Amino acid sequence: MEQNNKLSMSRRHFVGVASILGASLGLAACGQSEQAAPEKKPEEAKEKSAEATKPAEEKKEGAGLQDEYDLVVVGAGGAGLSTAISAFDAGVKNICVLEKMGVVGGNSNFATSGMNASETKYQKEQGIEDSNVLFADETFKGGHELGNRELVDFMCQHSAGAIDWLAENGIVLDNLTQTGGMSVKRCHRPTDGAAVGGVLIKGLKAAMEKRSLPIFDEHKVTKLVKEGDSVNGLEVETKEGKKTIKAKAIVLAAGGLGSNQELIKKYRPDLEGYVSTNHAGATGDGYVLGEEAGAELIQMDQIQIHPTVEQSSAKLIGEALRGSGGILVNKEAKRFTNEMDTRDKVSAAELKQPEKIVYLIFDQKVYDANKAAAKYEKAGITKKGTDLADLAKQLELDPTTLQATVDAYNEVAGGKADEFGRTTGLAQLDFGTAYAIKVAPGIHHAMGGIKINDKNQALDKDNNPIKGFYAAGEVTGGIHGGNRIGGNAVCDIIVFGKNTGEQVAEFLKA
Ligand code: ADP
């Protein structure tokens, strides 16, 4: 196919990281009206997300989209960027990444807790005993044993290697914390305790730029072209019009569906109207494209709701705040659950509370250990008291009961058995300055999706790989089963993104 001169005007956009971080703040800074959950205002949430992902001002001219590539990656989130980088390092040279939004990073930008990994050099340095088997067991169990055990094992066995690979690419995750459902500290965060997403995408973008790998933003893939039993091209919608390009291999890394109310309604009618933590581009295109090209979709009803979402901003409040000591209390100022239980269980417990009102309460130590806490405060979604009684007054909670709740929790943190069974993430709370964020469940992660094998090949209904067609990241199904553990999404996208790049290189060599 001839090079389209008109399209050669289309630009490779290298989006400033400041704009990504700004986008994240923009999302947080939206409306402040507090609501009980779940509140029906998807359109509003969508608008806010759209606002958050405005195109960056700074764009750099580059070559236009070619007619033919060895590898085309659909989606510039964590999985897509990892795929492109690892494919390049494994010898694939003619690569491009297509991204429909005006910024790169997708939902990966907003990943908060960190990346779970076992047997890592950082765990060893810090004297934390762990094993890949334990990590896999807890992931499988946390997902109600619905995940594909082979994929779970693969992810956990390759997690330490993925942490090293990120470090080689300048992304150091050496600050360890714990998330719900994990019995040891294996959630790896940036050194300063910052939310992982911004740091990850900034680092992966830098690695792309270092290799001069192009990302075409505002390029939406609308169809995968299939010839016989192989996928070998795709249709792309750009500002300049439609274009069909050829590719020897295609990787779908188009993320989830949390911002598509129609698909939510189709797969989980009971979640209609829940706010979503997802960015505006999480509209499930990958499932539709994949299915049309013959891939089987599995476990599509497995959509996770996350228990700590601030409802007015749809902002996810990272699990690490609980992992470093935070507690949840209801309107009666009482704890009601093991805050470190898996997300599905904590969410279910919240929905049973009076008026569905729940507050995450934490002290200055927790605030200081989690950089995101300052962002939440800046976004205006945090209440701050000079002491616990002052905070109770602001939240209209009974101060004596709240104090008694904290005292009882501090005894648990000191070694006493907890009536709710919390045994992890325990640290005594010391007020002083006291903080609270009102939270409720929100749609967070699609655990079902395109069926893959451990080569990240997309499989058809008979489990046969579709030639030239790979998938990675949230768009795939079967890893997290019925509940994704906090910190496992980043592990998934990096381990399987890296794997996909390597597998595509092998395929192209053959
Ligand atoms: P993951 O965590 O699996 O990497 P992300 O949500 O971080 O998922 O990234 C997926 C990216 O794919 C998002 O940036 C999203 O905008 C992009 N995307 C989704 N659908 C399309 C499409 N049809 N064409 C191009 N990019 C897409």
Image (tube, rainbow, N blue to C red):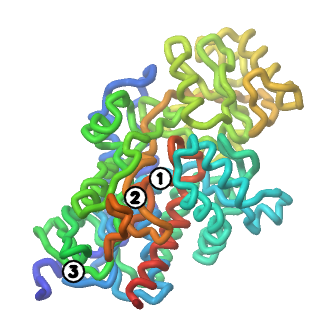
First along the sequence among labels 1 and 3: 3
- Viewer-proximal residue among 196 and 236: 236
User: Looking at the rendered structure, which numbered label has been put on residue 451?
Assistant: 2
Under circle 1, the secondary element is loop
Residue at 66% x, 63% y is 173
- In the rendered structure, are the residues bearing label 1 and label 2 in contact, judged by CB atoms less than 8 Å apart? yes
Residue at 53% x, 69% y is 203
C-alpha span from label 3 to label 2: 24 Å
Residue at 58% x, 62% y is 155
Residue extending furthest front?
Answer: 462
Mark 3, Cα crowd under 10 Å, few <14 / some 14-19 / many 20+, is: many
Three-letter code, disc 2: Lys
Under circle 2, the secondary element is strand
| 161 versus 188 height, above or below | below
C-alpha span from label 1 to label 2: 7 Å
Under circle 3, the secondary element is strand
- Viewer-proximal residue among 370 and 343: 343
- The quarter in which the N terminus is drawn is bottom left
Describe residue 199's horizontal placement relative to residue 314 as left or right: right
Q: At which x and y percent is residue 332? A: 63, 11
| 237 versus 369 height, above or below | below
| Mark 1 lies on residue | 478
